[in-house]
Amino acid sequence: MPKIFIKLFADGADLGEMISMYRDPRIVGFTTNPTLMRQAGVADYEKFARKVLEAIPDRPVSFEVFADDLSEMARQARVIAGWGPNVNVKIPVVNTKGEFTGPILSALSNEGVTLNVTAIMTVQQVRDVAAALAPETPAIISVFAGRIADTGVDPVPHMKACRAALASRPRAELLWASPRELLNVFHAQEAGCHIITATPGILSKLELVGKDLTQFSLETVQMFYRDATASGFEIDVAQRKLAAEVGGVSDIREDVR
């Protein structure tokens, strides 16, 4: 059976799902973002965050700033960091104008704030972030490997290069973000990533790791049969046979093309 040794984080903003994932000892951290919160119907950011931290007090949880001005980002980051000792503050690598957030990453990291620098795509961005971070302060570098793959680029060698770019920052962990399938867990391991974050839907497939494929084939056929039966599908074989006998072979061939 393939071994999983990478750190598994759960990505989402549904409190019930997060608590369920917390009960799984394999899940050692959590990530969120404003888009996931909006999709989950979160109306009060801080109230939601405090409920999460009350339920999950001893594993890292990432909460993201939502300002666009760098100084306001830094102000929000300091507030969020104060919500709990296990909080990682997510800051995007650039703002909506494309301005690199390096100056505030440097200031916050030097203050001891544990950052999760997010929305990273390029190796150069990883180099720039590494240069901005304080060597002694832990940090997470979230590279969106799934989105990189969506462009047709193989993310494994790309993430290996990202890992190499972090050589000068041993306390910074590389995170494989936006996975598309469970197999990405093993891709992330191969690339040398420290962490992968995934939705509960992907993480639920952990139970399939190492499953016998012959048995899996049988279960798949059984599933198709159950669903077809439950749907009440019918094919009138007798009527088709009669039509074939009346119409002749040429009609049968025409009918099944």
Image (cartoon, helix red, strand yellow):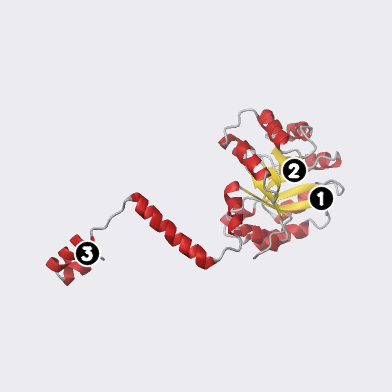
Name the residue carrying label 2: 60
* Disc 3/disc 1 C-alpha distance (Å): 69 Å
Marks 3 and 1: which is nearer the front? 3
Task: Report x, y in % for residue 107.
Answer: 83, 39
Residue 162 appears at what percent x and percent y? 73, 57
Q: Is residue 221 above or below residue 175?
A: below
Residue at the location (69% across, 29% down)? 46
- The amino acid type of the residue labelled 3 equals Asp
Q: Is residue 241 visible?
A: yes
Which residue corresponds to mark 3? 255
Mark 2 in CB contact with mark 3 (< 8 angstroms): no
Q: How many marks?
A: 3
**Gap between marks 2 and 3 measured at Cα:** 62 Å
Q: Please provide percent x and percent y for residue 124.
A: 73, 54
Which disc number belongs to residue 131?
A: 1
Report the Cα–Cα distance between label 1 and label 2. Answer: 24 Å
Which amino acid lies under the numbered mark 1 shown in the image of this protein?
Ala
Please identify the quarter of the rendering in which residue 184 is found: bottom right
Query: What x and y, as percent, mark residue 87?
Result: 76, 39
Q: Regarding mark 2 in the picture, which secondary structure is present there?
A: loop
- Of the image marks 1 and 2, the number of the one nearer the N terminus: 2
